[in-house]
C-alpha cells in the first residue's frame, strides 16, 4: 500500500481565528452553529464539514458569507472525511472551545489558533486523513521578566481575560 503525506496550508483573514477538528455526524454543522450563535451574538463565523459517506459533500453554514466560503475552501483543501473547519471573527476560541469539545459529534480538536497553520494530511488508497497540525512557529527563547509583564498586561488590559 502506498502512503503519501501532504502539508496543506490553511488560509484565512488576519483578523480571524480557525478551529480544525474531527467529527462523525452530519448534525455537526447545526450543533456547531448553535455553539457559535449562543456564545456571542456579535461574533461572525463560517463552518464547513467534510462528509465521509455518500453523497460525500462539504456541508456548511455560518452567519458571514466571507468566513463561510473561507471554511469551505480550507475544508476542501484538507479533503479528509469527517473534518470540520470553523473560522471566526469577533470572538476568541477560548470562549467556545469547551462547548465545541462537548458537542456530541466532535471527536477531536486539532487546533484553535490565529497563527499561521499547516495541516499534515496522510493519503492512502482509501482517502485522506489528518495526522496533525503545525501551529505557528518554534520558540526563539525563554520568557524573561519583561516578557512576563507583557503577557500579564495583554491578558489583563488588552483582552481583559484576567483582573
Image (cartoon, grey):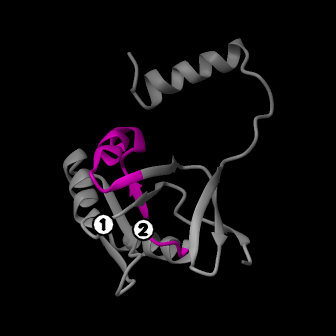
Q: Is residue 24 magenta?
A: no
Q: Secondary structure at mark 2?
A: loop
> Image quarter for residue 4?
bottom right
Q: Horizontal and vertical percent for residue 56? A: 39, 83
Q: Secondary structure at mark 1?
A: loop
Q: Horizontal and vertical percent for residue 98? A: 34, 39
Disc ID at residue 82: 2
Residue at mark 1: 25
Residue at image point 32% right, 58% down: 44
Residue nearest the viewer, comparing 35 with 157: 35
Residue nearest the viewer, comparing 119 with 89: 119
Residue nearest the viewer, comparing 23 with 18: 23
Looking at the rendered structure, the number of numbered marks drawn on it comes to: 2
Residue at image point 58% right, 73% down: 128
**How many C-alpha atoms fall within 10 Å of the one at disc 1: few (<14), some, or many (≥20)?**
some
Q: Which residues are magenta?
A: 79-107
Q: Is residue 97 left or right of residue 138?
A: left
Amino acid at each position: 500500500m502506498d502512503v503519501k503525506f501532504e502539508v496543506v496550508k490553511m488560509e484565512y483573514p488576519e483578523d480571524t481565528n480557525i478551529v480544525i477538528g474531527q467529527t462523525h455526524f452530519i448534525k455537526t454543522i447545526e450543533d456547531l452553529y448553535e455553539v457559535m450563535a449562543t456564545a456571542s451574538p456579535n461574533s461572525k463565523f463560517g463552518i464547513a464539514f467534510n462528509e465521509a459517506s455518500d453523497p460525500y459533500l462539504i456541508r456548511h453554514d455560518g452567519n458571514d458569507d466571507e468566513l463561510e466560503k473561507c471554511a469551505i475552501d480550507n475544508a476542501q483543501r484538507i479533503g479528509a472525511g469527517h473534518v470540520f473547519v470553523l473560522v471566526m471573527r469577533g470572538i476568541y476560541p477560548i470562549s467556545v472551545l469547551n462547548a465545541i469539545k462537548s458537542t456530541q459529534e466532535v471527536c477531536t480538536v486539532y487546533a484553535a489558533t490565529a497563527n499561521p497553520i499547516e495541516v499534515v494530511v496522510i493519503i492512502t488508497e482509501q482517502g485522506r486523513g489528518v495526522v496533525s497540525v503545525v501551529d505557528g512557529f518554534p520558540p526563539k527563547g525563554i520568557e524573561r521578566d519583561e516578557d512576563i509583564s507583557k503577557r500579564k498586561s495583554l491578558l489583563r488590559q488588552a483582552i481583559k481575560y484576567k483582573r
